[in-house]
Image (cartoon, helix red, strand yellow):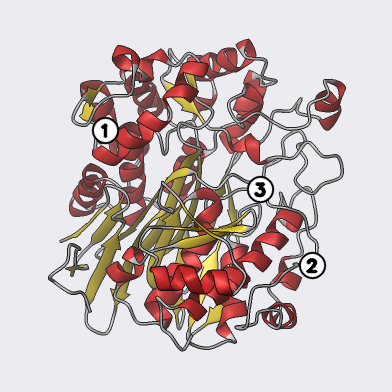
C-alpha cells in the first residue's frame, strides 16, 4: 500500500469510461470523444492524433501503429498490424554493391513507408463509430494554433538537437534550439496535412501532394522510395490473429511477429513455473530471475523474429510448454548464466520513443493502442511542406544476407512496439502497455508480474523501479536499492546506472464484479489517467 508520506499518486477510478495516455491533453481528448458517444477505438485514435502533434519526439503520422481491440461481449481480441514496409527497390544486392554493412539511423534508408494513417482508417472502418474527419479536429487545432511544450517533451527534444541539426530540420529548432518548457510550438504544415487526411481519408496521405513531398524529401537524401511505394501503403495494414499464453489465471494477448510481443509471453511462461520470489517484488531473487528470463527471450528474438510473410518464425515452438520449461531449467537462483546458448548478439539500441495509450468505454470495449516514430524524432528527416516527421523503423533491418531480418523489397522489419491485452474467461480485464522500444517486452512482463503476481496496485506496478539486461550489463534506474545492486554483482551480473529511465506505461483494469474501472499512468512521462 502506498505510503502517503512520500510523493506519488493513487490509481484513478471511474464507472463509465477511462483513458490513460502520456499527455494530459490527449487523455482529455479521449474523454471528450467518449462523452460525445464515440467508442474506445474512436477515442484512442483521436488521442493518438493529438499526441502526434504535442509529443512529436515520440510519435507522428510518419510512424507506425499496432492495436489490440476487445469488443465487449464478443469473446475475441482483434489484432491490427500497421507497420510499414521497405521500398520496392530495397534489395540486399543494392546495399552490398555499395559496401554498406548497416543502415544509418538518420539516413533515408532507415525510413519505411509509414503505416499509421492506413492503420487508423482500417480500424475505424471495421470497428469505429466515427470518421477521421471528426476525430482529427482536436489535433488539427493544436497543430495550427500551437501547444505548450511539456517538461518531458522538452527534455527529450533537447537531447535530440544534434540529430535534428544533422538533417537540417530547422523548423523543429526554433531560435536555434529545442523549445523550452511552456513555449508554444506551431506546426502549420502538419495542420494542413491533417486537414487533407480529414477530408480525403488515408488516400490524402499516401497519394497526391503529401506523398509527393515525402518521397521527394527522401530521394534528395538518397532514398529508394517512390510514390508507387506510398500508394501501396494505402493497403498496408492488416488484421492478425493475436498470440497468447495462459498465465496466473489470465490469458495474455500480443500481436504476433514481426513484432516482439512474443517475448512477453515467453518470459511469463518461463517465470510462471518458478513461483513467487521469496523476497518479494523489490527483492534480489525476483530481479535476478526476471533478468535471466529476459536474456533468454531476447536471445531468441534476435535470432528468429522477423516478417512472417517472408520467413518462417517458429512461434509455436517458442511458446510451447516444453521449450519454455527447458529455458526455465537454465535459470538458477545461485547465479547468472555465464554463457547463453549462442543465438546472436542483440543489435537494437536500448532507448526508443513511442506513445502507448489505452481506453475503455461505457460499453466495456477495450482498446490497447501504440504509435511510434521508433527513436526520438525517428530519422530526424522532416518533409517540410507537409510537416511530416519520418520514422526510422528500417534501422531494425540487418544488411546480412540470409538473416531472417535482412532487408528486402516490401518487407517489414522486426518491430519493437507492442500493445498488450489481458482477458479472463473470454472477457477483457485490462488493456495495458509499456513503451520503450527494445525494453518493451521486459516492461510488459515486469508490470504484469508486479500487478497480477505480487499484488501491487496498478499505479504502484507502473511506478516500481525498473532494470534491464543489455549488452552484457544490467541497466538500472536510480530507484533500485543498493542492497539489490550489491546482490546482483554477487550473482555475476554487472549493474550500470542509466540517465534516462526505462519506458513508460499505462493500464486500465476492468473490475466487472464491482462495476468500476481503475487506471494508472506513467510518472516517467507527462502521463495522466482520467475517467468519468
Q: Residue at x 76, y 64 (%)?
A: 314
Q: Which mark is residue 22?
A: none
Residue located 30% across and 33% down the image:
154
Q: Quadrant of the N terminus?
A: bottom left
Query: Looking at the image, which residue sits at the far left?
Result: 5
For disc 3, the neighbor class at 10 Å (few under 14, some 14 to 19, many from 20) is many
Seen from the viewer's position, the closer of residues 77 and 430 is 430
What distance separates the C-alpha of mark 3 from that of mark 2? 22 Å
Q: Earlier in the sequence, mark 3 or mark 1?
A: 1
Q: Is residue 159 left or right of residue 206?
A: left
Decide if residue 193 is on the left or right side of residue 520: right
Residue 428 percent location from the top left of the image: 40, 72
Q: Is disc 3 in contact with disc 2, using a CB cutoff of under 8 Å?
A: no
Residue 167 picture location, percent across and down: 52, 17
Residue at (35%, 18%) from the top-left corner?
173
Which secondary structure lies at badge 1? helix
Please tell me whether residue 329 is drawn above or below residue 142 in the rendered image.
Answer: below
- Residue 14 seen in render: yes
Quadrant for the C terminus, please.
Answer: bottom left
Tell me the residue that label 3 is attached to. 414
Q: Residues within 10 Å of mark 1 (few under 14, many from 20)?
A: some
Which of the two labelled residues, at mark 3 and mark 2, occupies the earlier sequence position? 2
Compared to 460, does 95 lie above or below? above
* 374 relative position to 192: left or right: right
Q: Which mark is residue 341?
A: 2
Q: Which mark is residue 137?
A: 1
Any part of residue 72 in sight: no
Residue 491 at what x, y percent from top left?
A: 59, 74
**Viewer-side label of 3, 2:** 2
Location of residue 210 in the rendering, given as x and y in whole percent from the top left corner:
48, 18
Amino acid at each position: 500500500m502506498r505510503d502517503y508520506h512520500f510523493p506519488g499518486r493513487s490509481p484513478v477510478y471511474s464507472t463509465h469510461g477511462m483513458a490513460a495516455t502520456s499527455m494530459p491533453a490527449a487523455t482529455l481528448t479521449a474523454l471528450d470523444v467518449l462523452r460525445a458517444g464515440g467508442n474506445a477505438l474512436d477515442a484512442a485514435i483521436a488521442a493518438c492524433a493529438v499526441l502526434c502533434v504535442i509529443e512529436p519526439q515520440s510519435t507522428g503520422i510518419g510512424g507506425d501503429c499496432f492495436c489490440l481491440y476487445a469488443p465487449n461481449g464478443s469473446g475475441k481480441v482483434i489484432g491490427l498490424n500497421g507497420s510499414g514496409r521497405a521500398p520496392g527497390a530495397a534489395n540486399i544486392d543494392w546495399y552490398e554493391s555499395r559496401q554498406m554493412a548497416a543502415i544509418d539511423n538518420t539516413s533515408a534508408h532507415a525510413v519505411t513507408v509509414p503505416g499509421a494513417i492506413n492503420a487508423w482508417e482500417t480500424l475505424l472502418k471495421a470497428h469505429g463509430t466515427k470518421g477521421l474527419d471528426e476525430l482529427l479536429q482536436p489535433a488539427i487545432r493544436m497543430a495550427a494554433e500551437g501547444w505548450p511544450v511539456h517538461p518531458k517533451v522538452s527534455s527529450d527534444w533537447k537531447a535530440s538537437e544534434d540529430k535534428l541539426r544533422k538533417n537540417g530540420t530547422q523548423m523543429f529548432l526554433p531560435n536555434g534550439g529545442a523549445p523550452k518548457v511552456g513555449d508554444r510550438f506551431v506546426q502549420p504544415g502538419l495542420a494542413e496535412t491533417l486537414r487533407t487526411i480529414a477530408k480525403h481519408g488515408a488516400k490524402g496521405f499516401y497519394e497526391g501532394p503529401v506523398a509527393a513531398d515525402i518521397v521527394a524529401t527522401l530521394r534528395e537524401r538518397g532514398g529508394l522510395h517512390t510514390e508507387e511505394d506510398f500508394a501501396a501503403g494505402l493497403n498496408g495494414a492488416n488484421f492478425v490473429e493475436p498470440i497468447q499464453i495462459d498465465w496466473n489465471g489470465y490469458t495474455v494477448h500480443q500481436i504476433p511477429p514481426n513484432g516482439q510481443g512474443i517475448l512477453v509471453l515467453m518470459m511469463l511462461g518461463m517465470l510462471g513455473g518458478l513461483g513467487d520470489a521469496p523476497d518479494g517484488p523489490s527483492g534480489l531473487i525476483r530481479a535476478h530471475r526476471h533478468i535471466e528470463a529476459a536474456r533468454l527471450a531476447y536471445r531468441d528474438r534476435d535470432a528468429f523474429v522477423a516478417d512472417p510473410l517472408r520467413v518462417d518464425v517458429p512461434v509455436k515452438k517458442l511458446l510451447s510448454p516444453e521449450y519454455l520449461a527447458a529455458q526455465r531449467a537454465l535459470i538458477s537462483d545461485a547465479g547468472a548464466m555465464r554463457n547463453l546458448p549462442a543465438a546472436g548478439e542483440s543489435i537494437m539500441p536500448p532507448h526508443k520513443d513511442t506513445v502507448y495509450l489505452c481506453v475503455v468505454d461505457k460499453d466495456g470495449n477495450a482498446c490497447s493502442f501504440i504509435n511510434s516514430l521508433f527513436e526520438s524524432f525517428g530519422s530526424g528527416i522532416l518533409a517540410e511542406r507537409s510537416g511530416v516527421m519520418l520514422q526510422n523503423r528500417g534501422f531494425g533491418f540487418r544488411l546480412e544476407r540470409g538473416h531472417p531480418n535482412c532487408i528486402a523489397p516490401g518487407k517489414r522489419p522486426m518491430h519493437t512496439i507492442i500493445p498488450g491485452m489481458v482477458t479472463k474467461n473470454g472477457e477483457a480485464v485490462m488493456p495495458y502497455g509499456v513503451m520503450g522500444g527494445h525494453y518493451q517486452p521486459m516492461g510488459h512482463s515486469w508490470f504484469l508480474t508486479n500487478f497480477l503476481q505480487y499484488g501491487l496496485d496498478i499505479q504502484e506496478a507502473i511506478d516500481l523501479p525498473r532494470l534491464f539486461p543489455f549488452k552484457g550489463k544490467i541497466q538500472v534506474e536510480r530507484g533500485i536499492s543498493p542492497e539489490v545492486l550489491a546482490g546482483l554483482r554477487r550473482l555475476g551480473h554487472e549493474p550500470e546506472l542509466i540517465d534516462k529511465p526505462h519506458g513508460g506505461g499505462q493500464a486500465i483494469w476492468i473490475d466487472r464484479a464491482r462495476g468500476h474501472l481503475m487506471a494508472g499512468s506513467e510518472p516517467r512521462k507527462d502521463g495522466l489517467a482520467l475517467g468519468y
